Image (cartoon, grey):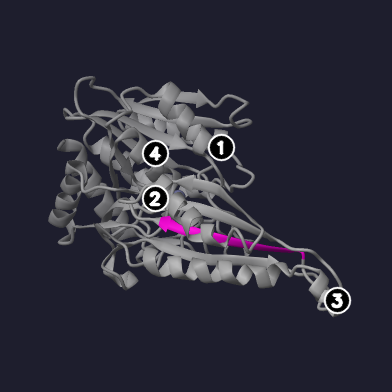
Amino acid sequence: MSKKWLGRLLELVALDTTNPPGKNYRQAMALLKPWCREAGLKTELVEIPEKIAKDRVNLLAHRRHPGKPRLLVYSHIDVVPADEDWQPFKPRVEKDKIFGRGVADMKGSLIAFLAAAEQVKDQKLPWDLTLMITTDEETNQKAQVEYLLDRKIDQVKGAVFLDIDSTFGYVSIGGLGHIAVKITVHGKAVHSGISHTGVNAIEKAVPILNALMKLKEKVEARFSQIPVNPELGIEKMQAKLNIDVIAGGKKVNIVPDRCQIEVDRRLIPEESVGQAQEEIRQALEPLKDQVDFDLEFVHSMAGYGQVSPAARKLAQIMKQVTGQGELYGVMGSGDLLAMAADYDWQFAGLGVIRDKESNAHGRLENVYLEDLDVVTKILKRFLLQA
Ligand SMILES: [Zn+2]
């Protein structure tokens, strides 16, 4: 990475954009605006309407060529909070790495993209390009991103969507869907000595837990066609069902009147939200006569996974540059992936976060200088070939 862009990365990291609460967003956009222009992009500041988010500004940067394949590049400028003891906002280069909050997630890859765009600014691009510089990714930005996509950016449907808030070493092509399930078992509280006159909600929850464990076995036998990073110990994306919360009971001598169970169900891209919900309903249905419970789907979103031509192209370029070019689904979920399914995108993710080393949300967050160079090189080539 050139001295100029490295200096800018350090400057951007030194600007504390911690979220929550969302510090210095305006200042960050003010820094980035001229840098985008220098990279050959036309900038457009977008004030997010109050009813969606208070005092939020996003930046779009375009190189439009209507009629050419649409390319949307996604980034965000907020970072997660950090302890002061490692001076997270005093970024520094030490040997082959840069340390500082946000260097990996994801100011590093944003600067890498701008450096790449600058290198091709005098060349014809085969793309109709828009870069999205967003806020609040680390808390909840769904409504803001939807506002951008639905009101401020055109030709969104079917676009190539390049997510540079992503990992280094492979191209991400999907992620899991997610259903958060809440089951509340009702009982009747009485003193333990006369428990025959009450209903023990925890004990009543046992057959529910057993039914869920049976369902878990069935669900987790399901694998996607989409491969995952073999370091995870599985070869393909796998459907998941976990009982992650159980809460109930107040005191050892009181029969509990309530027991709450929370289940985290992760869907492979081939599964539908509706079918997965129905499957849970049916697994618990036979217990309706013996247990008084409510079943609630608190949050649901679909998964996404596709080896698209654009992802394949990116992986090919990566292979030319680094010798490695795998395409993997990630075993996590995100709003962008759910949107990828809705907007019918060709989704591909590549960034500078090293899963094991970057410590993206932790102490001493870091990025390799070399990775910044490699990603700049890959992005440059990608910009030149549709
Ligand atoms: Zn991020």
Residue type for callout 2:
Gly
Tell me which numbered mark, 2 or 4, is placed earlier along the sequence.
Answer: 2
Residue type for callout 4:
Met
Q: Which segment is the magenta one?
A: 257-266
Query: Marks 1/2: CA distance?
Result: 17 Å
Q: Are marks 4 and 3 in contact (CB under 8 Å)?
A: no
The label on residue 108 is 2
* Residue 345, x across and y down, in percent: 29, 37
Name the residue beneath numbered marker 4.
Answer: 339
Q: Are marks 3 and 2 in contact (CB under 8 Å)?
A: no
Tell me which numbered mark, 1 or 2, is placed earlier along the sequence.
Answer: 1
Q: Residue at x 46, y 34 (%)?
A: 145
For numbered disc 3, what is the local secondary structure? helix
Tell me which numbered mark, 3 or 1, is placed earlier along the sequence.
Answer: 1
Q: Quadrant of residue 233?
A: bottom left
The C terminus sits in image quarter:
top left
Near mark 3 (Cα within 10 A), the count class, few <14, some 14-19 or many ≥20, is few
Q: Residue at x 62, y 26 (%)?
A: 51
Name the residue beneath numbered marker 1.
Answer: 25
